[in-house]
Amino acid sequence: MPVTTIAWIDHKVRLIDQTKLPTDLVYLDIDEVETLGEAIKKLRVRGAPALGVAGAFGVLLGLQKFHDEEKAKFFLELQRVVTYLRGTRPTAVNLAWALERMQRIAEAHREQPLAQIKNALFAEANKIFVEDQQTCRAIGRHGAALIPDPATIITHCNTGALATADFGTALGVAFTAHAQGKKLHIIVDETRPLLQGARLNMWELLQENIPCTLICDNMAAFVMQRRKIDCCLVGADRIARNGDTANKIGTYSLAVNAQKHGVPFYVVAPVSTIDFNIASGQEIPIEERAAEEITEGFGRRTAPFNVEVYNPAFDVTPNDLITAIITEAGAIRPPYAQNLSKLQPQPREPRHTGV
Ligand code: MRU
C-alpha cells in the first residue's frame, strides 16, 4: 500500500508535512483554509494531483461551518476560498481544475437546502480523491507497457505517492513495472533547489526496495553519455493543447539531454493536467519562488547577501522533445495538438442529483 499523503479525516485535512522528509514522518491535521493555504505555499503538500485533492478538501474546510439560513454568506465564502486557494500555486492546473469542479457542483445545487449542497460538495471532493487513485493505476499500467526489462530510468522531481492520492504518475509507472517483475534501476535527479528527488523519491523508492542512485541534476547528461539509459519518466504540472509541458525546473534540460543521447522522454500525467484552454506553453503561468530557496536552502547560506536571484519553480519542455504523454487513456504520441484534443472532456449538463 502506498503511503497516504492527504486524507479527509474527522472534518480536517490530514497531510504528511513533506518539508520534514526524509528524516521525519510528520502528519498535520488542518482545520483552517488559511493553514492549508500556507501548507500549499510552503510545499508541505505538493505535486499537481495532490494539490487538486488539497483544493477540493480546502473547499470543504472553508464551508463546513455554515448553517441553513446562511446560504448567501456560504456562496460568498465559496468564491473567496476558491480565489484564495487558486492563488496559492499558479502553475499546477490540477488545483484550479479541482476548485472549479467544486464550484460547479455548488452552483448546480444552488436551489437546494445548504445541507444538500454540503453533501454534494463532500461527494465531489471524495470523487476527486478516488478518481485520482484509479487514474494513477491506469497510468501505471499504460506506462509499464513501455518499460523494457531490465531498464535504467532517469526521473526528475517527486511524482510518487507523496504527489498524488495513490502511488503516483511517473514513479507509479516504475512501481507498476517493478511489481510486474521487471528489473529496474532508477537514476534520481536531486531536483534543485528544494530536492524533491533526493528527499522524496529516494525515500519512496527505498521503501519499495527498487534499486536507485541519486545524482545532482547537472550530472544527467554525463550519465546518459556513459551508460545506457532506457528512458526518462517525468510528471507534469500543466500541459498545453499542443503538448508543451510545464514541470519542475530542470525538466527541460533533461529533455534536451535525452534528445541528444537518443533517450525516449516520457511525460506521465492525468488528463486533468492538460489545460485545454491554452494553445501552447507560452501561456502557462510560471511560479517564481523566494530567493532564499537558492541562497540559503535548508538553513545554510550558500551565496553572498544581496545577490540578484531568479528562481522559477517550473520550466516548459517543448512538445518536440517529448516522445509520448502517458495518461490514464493511454500513451499519446505526436502530433499532440491533434491527439490530445481527443481527450478533451465534453461539457456536461449541470447535475441535480441532490446527493
Ligand atoms: O513544486 P512541486 O514539488 O509541487 O512540483 C512538482 C512537480 O513538478 C511534479 O513533477 C508534478 O507536479 C507532477 S506530480 C505527479
Image (cartoon, grey):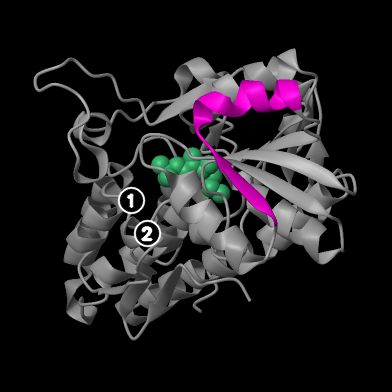
Comparing labels 1 and 2, the label whose residue is closer to the camera: 2
Range shown magenta: 211-226
Q: Position of residue 243 (x, y in %)?
A: 66, 25
Q: Amino acid at mark 1?
A: Leu
Q: Position of residue 319 (x, y in %)?
A: 67, 19
On screen, residue 126 versus residue 258, left or right, reads left
Main SS of residues in magenta: helix
Q: Can you name the residue that lies furthest to the bottom here?
A: 10
Q: Is residue 118 above or below residue 51?
A: below
Name the residue: 60% across, 37% down: 274
8 sits left or right of 35 in the view:
right
Query: Quick one: label 1 or label 2, which is nearer the N terminus?
Result: 2
Is 66 left, or right, of 218 in this rendering?
left
Does the beta carbon of the residue at mark 1 sit less than 8 Å from ligand 1?
A: yes
Q: Are marks 1 and 2 in contact (CB under 8 Å)?
A: yes
Kindly report the distance in space between the C-alpha atoms of the residues bearing marks 1 and 2: 7 Å
Q: Nearer the viewer, residue 313 or 206?
A: 206
Q: Residues within 10 Å of mark 2 (few under 14, many from 20)?
A: many
Residue 261 is marked as none
Which residue is depicted at the point 74% across and 24% down?
226
Please tell me in which quadrant of the rendered image residue 220 appears.
top right
Question: Could you tell me if residue 141 is visible in this image?
Answer: yes
Q: Nearer the viewer, residue 123 or 18?
A: 18
Residue 348 shown left or right of residue 94 in the figure: right
Amino acid type shown at disc 2: Gln
Q: Which residue is mark 2?
A: 18
Q: In the displayed structure, would residue 313 be above or below residue 142?
A: above
Q: Which mark is residue 43?
A: 1
- Looking at the image, how many numbered discs can be counted on the residues? 2
Q: Nearer the viewer, residue 332 or 19?
A: 19
Is 221 in the magenta?
yes
